[in-house]
Image: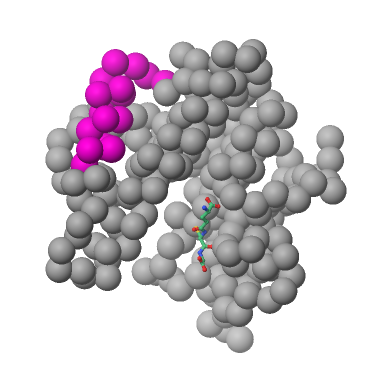
Amino acid sequence: MSELVIWTLDWVPMPDGPAGFVRDLRLRWACEEAGFDYSVKTVPLDGKGPDHLARQPFGQVPFLDDGDLKLFESGACLLHLAGKSEKLMPHDPAGAAETLQWTIAALNSVEMASVPWWFLEVTGAKENGLTDLLESRLDGLEAVLKEREWLAADRFTVADLLMADVLRVKKIREFGDRPASESFVKRITERPAFKKAYADQMSHFKAADKAKNKG
Ligand SMILES: N[C@@H](CCC(=O)N[C@@H](CS)C(=O)NCC(=O)O)C(=O)O
C-alpha cells in the first residue's frame, strides 16, 4: 500500500482557535477507522506559498497524498479512502452509491448552510438571514435520523463520519429540538477512531503552540 500523508496547518491560535475542528480530523478519523498507517505534514497558517496553492488552490487544508496521487477537498479525500477499505463504505454498487449520496448531502446540503450561518453568527451580524435555510436542512435531516441509525447502507460509512463532523459544531445545533440528530452526533463521535483522531489533532496543535511560545 502506498504511503498516506495528511496535510494540515502548522499552528492555529490556542485556546480559542479551531483546534479540534480543523478538517484534517476527517481524514485522520477515516484512516483510524480503516486501520491505515498515515503521517501528518504541515503548511504554514500564515502566508500561503505557491507550494500550498499548487496543492490546494483555495489555500485551505486538508489535502492528501496517496503515494503519487494528490487530492484536496475533505469529501473527495474521504471518498478516495473509502474506495480503499470496505470499513468506510460497502463496495457493492448500491451501497457505494448511497454512501456517495449522503456524503454529498453532508457537504452540499448541510455544510453549505451551516458554515455561512456560523460565520454570520460569530461575526455578530445583526440579522442572520440563513437561519431559516439552516433550520430547514437540520429539520430534514432530523426526520431521516428519527427513522434510522446510519445514513447509508444500514451500517457505518464515511457519510456518517462526515455528517457527524459537520453537525459536531455545537453552535449550529443550539436552536431547535432535534433529539435524533443529537443522539446521532453523540453515537458517531463516541467511536474510538474519532476519539483517537481528535486527541491526535489536539496534541499536534498543543505541541505547535508550545513550540511557538518558546521560540
Ligand atoms: N471545502 C473544503 C474546506 C476546507 C476548509 O475550510 N479548511 C479550513 C480549515 S478546516 C482552512 O484551511 N481554513 C483556512 C483558510 O480558509 O484560509 C474541504 O472540505 O476540504
Does the magenta portion include 182? no
Q: Residue 61, can we see it?
A: yes
| Image-based side of 146 in relation to 93, left or right | left
Q: Which residue is drawn at 61% across and 79% down?
A: 47
Q: Residue at x 57, y 47 (%)?
A: 74
| Image-based side of 170 in relation to 100, left or right | left
| Image-based side of 200 in relation to 83, left or right | left
- Toward the viewer: 71 or 22? 71
Q: Residue 10: x, y in percent?
A: 61, 69
Q: Residue 127: x, y in percent?
A: 15, 63
In which quadrant is the C terminus drawn? bottom right
The quadrant holding residue 30 is: top right
Image: 150 above or below 131: above
Image: 72 above or below 158: below
Does the magenta portion include 138? yes
Q: How many numbered discs sit on the rendered protein?
A: 0
Image: 45 above or below 26: below
Q: Residue at x 43, y 38 (%)?
A: 106
Where are the magenta residues, as a range? Answer: 135-150
The quadrant holding residue 35 is: top right
Q: Residue 192: x, y in percent?
A: 51, 34
The quadrant holding residue 149 is: top left
- Toward the viewer: 210 or 117? 117
Task: Give the residue at the far bottom of this rendering.
Answer: 215
Q: Main secondary structure of the magenta part?
A: helix
In which quadrant is the N terminus drawn? top right
